[in-house]
Amino acid sequence: MGMSTGGGKGRGRYRAMAEINVTPLVDVMLVLLIIFMVAAPLMTVGVPIDLPKTNASALNQETEPLTISVNAEGRIFLQETEVPIENLVAQLQAIMREQRPGAPERRIFVRGDRGINYGRVMEVMGTVSSAGFTKVALLAEQPSG
């Protein structure tokens, strides 16, 4: 009947392709690499903050960090001394000047009462950050249990 059994010359002409063309895959991967390289620096937040994780171990530090606390009434304390927000930067700069030359910058921890307005804590952090202090962190209490 006119059917060919596939033998002879016809079989050699149409072989299955044994190679995979990876050029489109490489092109797509390079484009994605460039996109992520450009987008990664843009993912940072305006105010650099190190937020501690709940189960994190204690930080190994040579110097004691400075602690700024905002109590439930919105008053600001540097260590245990109450300081108005207008004098906060001057107090911090005076403490940093007393530090020995070449010492690493001291960390500043900001503690805010649970019931305090978030804006007040951010106002304190913004004031400290605008004064040129870069190692500012928020403190949180670890959950019991």
Image: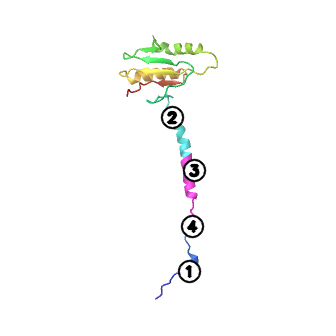
For label 1, the residue is: 10
What is the quadrant of the C terminus in the image? top left
For label 3, the residue is: 30
Crowd rating for badge 4 (residues with CA inside 10 Å; few <14, some 14–19, many 20+)? few
Residue 43 percent location from the top left of the image:
50, 37
Residue 86 percent location from the top left of the image:
47, 14
Judged by depth in the image, the label closer to the viewer, 3 or 1, is: 1
Residue 102: image quadrant is top right
106 or 125: which is nearer to us? 106
Residue type at the position of mark 4 = Ala
Residue type at the position of mark 1 = Gly
Distance from Cα at disc 3 to Cα at disc 4? 25 Å
- Coloration of the structure image: rainbow
Distance from Cα at disc 2 to Cα at disc 4? 46 Å
- Residue 18, label in figure: 4
Residue type at the position of mark 2 = Thr
Looking at the rendered structure, the secondary structure element under dot 1 is helix
Q: Earlier in the sequence, mark 4 or mark 1?
A: 1
Looking at the rendered structure, the secondary structure element under dot 3 is helix
12 or 29: which is nearer to us? 12
Crowd rating for badge 3 (residues with CA inside 10 Å; few <14, some 14–19, many 20+)? few
Judged by depth in the image, the label closer to the viewer, 3 or 4, is: 4
Distance from Cα at disc 2 to Cα at disc 1? 63 Å
Distance from Cα at disc 3 to Cα at disc 1? 41 Å
For label 2, the residue is: 44
Q: Does the CB distance between marks 3 and 4 fall below 8 Å?
A: no
Residue range in magenta is 18-33
Q: Earlier in the sequence, mark 2 or mark 4?
A: 4
Distance from Cα at disc 2 to Cα at disc 3? 23 Å
Crowd rating for badge 1 (residues with CA inside 10 Å; few <14, some 14–19, many 20+)? few
In the rendered image, residue 77 lying in the magenta stretch gets the answer no
Residue type at the position of mark 3 = Leu
